[in-house]
Amino acid sequence: MADSQEKQRKTLEERDQMSDLERLRHSTAHVLATAIAKLWPDAQFAAGPPVENGFYYDVDLEHRITPDDFDAIEGEMKKIVKENQVFEKEIVSRAEALKMAQSGRLAALGDRDTPSVFKIDLLEEIPEDEEISLYKNGDFWDLCAGPHVGRTGNCKAFKVMSVASAFYKGDASNPQLQRVYGTAFKNRTLLTEHLERLEEAKLRDHRKLGKDLDLFHIDEAVGQGLVLWKPNGAVIRQELQNFIGEHLVRQGYSQVFTPHIGKLDLYRTSGHFPYYADSQFPPVIEKESMKALADEGCGCGELSNKLESGEVDGFLLKPMNCPHHIKIFQSNHHSYRDLPVRLAEFGTVYRWEQSGELGGMTRVRGFTQDDAHIFCTEDQVKDEILGCLELVKIVLGTLGMDDYRVRVGLRDPDSSKYVGDPAKWDKAESALREAATTLGTDFAEEPGEAAFYGPKIDFVVKDVIGREWQLGTVQVDYNLPERFGLEYIGSDNSPHRPVMIHRAPFGSMERFVGVLIEHFAGKFPTWLAPEQVRILPISEKFVDDAQAVYDQLREDGIRVKVDSADEKVGAKIRLAQLDRIPYMLIIGAKEQELNQVSVRHRDRGDEGALSVVDFREKVVAEIASRSL
RNA sequence: GCUCUUGUAGCUCAGGGGUAGAGCACUUCCUUGGUAAGGAAGAGGUCAUGGGUUCAAUUCCCAUCAAGAGCUCCA
């Protein structure tokens, strides 16, 4: 937030550290800008930095750039590359730079009627003691601190990728610019490889696979961001819940169930209403109040005031589970001997995410957290955090998800959005930091990433198109115990305030399964696969034998189906492969005679014949061990 | 929420001012076949919704709803 402007401007030191690839991409951004300036001389350029997979340049332009323009843009870029213009650095005085900007000369091919408005703005942000440099390639002069490659001829392997819009300087109150994205690599081979990787990634997109494999459905009639789990998806979710459930028992959690709504007063106490009203579904107003209000002809604004003041009461779809769990904790008196109390629930919550934010399973409006709240003493905080991290590690380890990063979210010292005593924050932050060091993986401390009520550790993974998603989370909370006046009786026979820890190893079932679909590209390990075994009789004659094997496997709880369609076995195999079924059992005359099945694995191929008993044992063991 | 793009059969998509087409899936028939597609026939659509322009709109225009990309946001 506060640092978004700083992010726009790299320090000189950071610029010196720009990698060769970033330098190349940044230079290609200038080539892009040169091409756009040729095609549309009235273009006003803002910033054009390298980014993770390429670069972009922000431009304000009457003409709406569409993918249809890409050929023309790339054509111009190729000419500029071919001309092999030198990237020339020139140090100028502030006054000179300003003069050029006033005459529209910056980020342009020549003087213009209008000043280079964004460049003037950017000039003003450059610290007094910093030198001001221009980079020139051909007639294109741009205000730029560099660094660049030597010549435009170095920028051969590029591609214009997409165009989107972005707020100037990342501030939603600023005008929106057209952001043209491109990518560039050292050579064509690397570029082609990158483009192929993107194509492959599209194939494992969870939204596509969710449809192909019949895992989930989002229906307009139900609502945006509200996920319907279809039978296949439900199997995966249930297996994951069982898996977590087993570990909860081992770690001394108690399972609870709570309703999906709670009174507004509950959230007034927690501080979530009306503070977070914008990101909640509107309250459900009590019947009697509703009627009275309607009779009064109460308007919308009035209603909202009355809700805020508490004059009218109602219920809120729960945006989180904490208050309910707190009330469970509070329904008993607690001695220090009882602590920690660990309450776990797969709790469904509802949040009014902005419509532009919704997407697939990863950002939704109703989702189920594998939530738990731990109420403990100050002394227990560290061990409890360790326990939580242990659980996250077990989860990610079992699923083979090792491509994640750990983020320790600390408060932003300059912001006032945080509640609670700074001394307690310090304590919580150091507890988390200490716990994170025991993790054995690198972690990054990120100021400003804390929740408003406390610091946290997040496990972040990337989806197929490189977007980061927060999955598992462990958060310390000194705030809610205060607001609800939680207490336990200490060994000194006087009341003390417990500390709360929120934790969710998956984060939400929706997001986690979405990410998991992409992680496995739909090829779930046998224990998670909606259909674990498919039996393929060679012809109609062997359907009865297939059915007999089916019955035996079902006894062991194996999820199995028989494909009795009137098709050749090749076609049946193809279908089973497309459905990503781990095991195919082929039954024909040979197998019938020996009471065997021919085993084919979706990745390993033909594995030869086994007796039904042997196959059963093998698969049951594989499932029980949750092997990958 | 903002900008842009998109919305045609269950799925993937083509088409285009004169009320629609392919492949896969589905149904039926022929075929009884050994490790990624055997053949034939059939059924299936108010072309997202609501307005407007027009003799005529699924096609053009506007709005709404939804999806996608990016930005902003994410207790």
Image: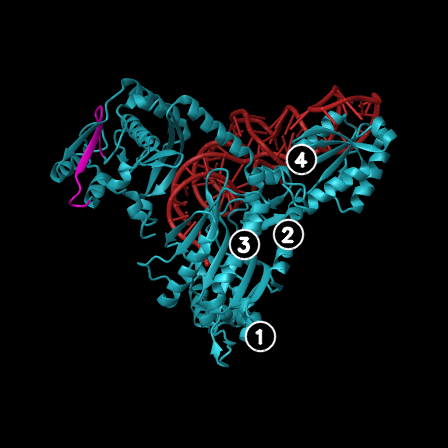
Chain colours: A cyan, B red
Q: Using the numbered discs, state the Cα–Cα distance from disc 2 to disc 4 in whole angstroms.
A: 24 Å
Crowding near pointer 1: few (<14 within 10 Å), some, many (20+)?
few
* Kind of residue sitting beneath label 1: Ser
Q: Closer to us: mark 2 or mark 3?
A: 3
Residue A173 in the magenta stretch? The answer is no
Q: Earlier in the sequence, mark 2 or mark 4?
A: 2
CB under 8 Å between discs 1 and 4: no
Q: Using the numbered discs, state the Cα–Cα distance from disc 3 to disc 1 in whole angstroms.
A: 29 Å
Residue at x-position 82% and y-position 33%: A596
**The residue stretch that appears in magenta:** A127-143
Q: Using the numbered discs, state the Cα–Cα distance from disc 4 to disc 3 in whole angstroms.
A: 34 Å
Q: Secondary structure at mark 4?
A: loop
The residue to which callout 1 is attached is A331
* Kind of residue sitting beneath label 2: Phe
The residue to which callout 4 is attached is A579
Question: Which numbered tag is attached to residue A390?
Answer: 3
Viewer-side residue, B47 vs A8? A8
Do callouts 4 and 3 point to residues on the same chain? yes
Question: Residue B17 in the image: x percent, y percent?
Answer: 52, 26
Question: Residue A200 in the image: x percent, y percent?
Answer: 53, 31
| Subunit that carries the residue with mark 3 | A
